[in-house]
Image (cartoon, rainbow, N blue to C red):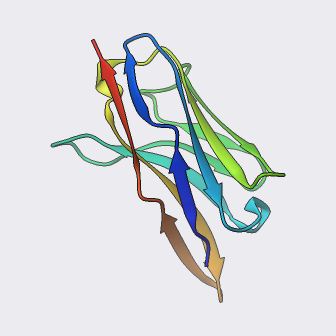
């Protein structure tokens, strides 16, 4: 089973930057993909970005050009660099590892990290 732990959230002014980290308990090459999702109060959960085991990336339209997902395979860690932050980016951000175990798909969620962007 894969476990993930997020870190790096906090309070930042609009226009500022933050970098979130997600450390996985196993080599990320054994994980099909890792994603960042977010949920703001009263809103639906949103998929923000995904990086596959092959290094391919996808982004929500709302963050394209501002957020970058990347990985450090030596550290089994995925990052979300968030630039030009807006108040509407305020949410709890979750890291999710998508993997297979015994041919069955699994999602392992972190505990979440709060990002607050002030105007």
From the viewer's side, name the closer residue of 49 and 77. Answer: 77
Can you name the residue that lies furthest to the bottom here?
A: 102
* Residue 43 horizontal/vertical position (percent): 21, 42
Judge from the rendering whether residue 117 lies leftward or rightward of residue 17; answer left or right.
left
* Residue 38 horizontal/vertical position (percent): 38, 44
* Residue 34 horizontal/vertical position (percent): 60, 54
Can you name the residue that lies furthest to the left here?
A: 42
* Residue in the picture at 59% in, 40% down: 58
Where, by quadrant of the figure, is residue 69 drawn? Answer: top right
* Residue in the picture at 52% in, 50% down: 6
Location of the C terminus by quadrant is top left
* Residue in the picture at 65% in, 61% down: 24
Callout count? 0
Location of the N terminus by quadrant is bottom right
Figure check: 10 above or below 107: above
Figure check: 96 above or below 72: below
From the viewer's side, name the closer residue of 90 and 48. Answer: 90
From the viewer's side, name the closer residue of 57 and 11. Answer: 11
* Residue 100 horizontal/vertical position (percent): 64, 77
* Residue in the picture at 47% in, 35% down: 60
Judge from the rendering whether residue 26 lies leftward or rightward of residue 4; answer left or right.
right
Where, by quadrant of the figure, is residue 111 drawn? Answer: bottom left
């Amino acid at each position: 089973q894969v476990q993930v732990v997020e870190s790096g959230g906090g309070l930042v002014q609009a226009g500022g930057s933050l970098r979130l980290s997600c450390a996985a308990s196993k080599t990320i090459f054994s994980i099909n993909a890792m994603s960042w999702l977010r949920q703001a109060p009263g809103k639906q959960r949103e998929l923000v970005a995904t990086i596959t085991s092959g290094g391919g990336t996808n982004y929500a339209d709302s963050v394209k050009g501002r957020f970058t997902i990347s990985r450090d395979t030596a550290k089994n860690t995925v990052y979300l660099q968030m630039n030009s932050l807006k108040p509407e980016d305020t949410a709890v951000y979750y890291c999710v590892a998508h993997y297979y175990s015994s041919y069955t798909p699994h999602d392992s969620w972190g505990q979440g990290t709060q990002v607050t962007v002030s105007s």
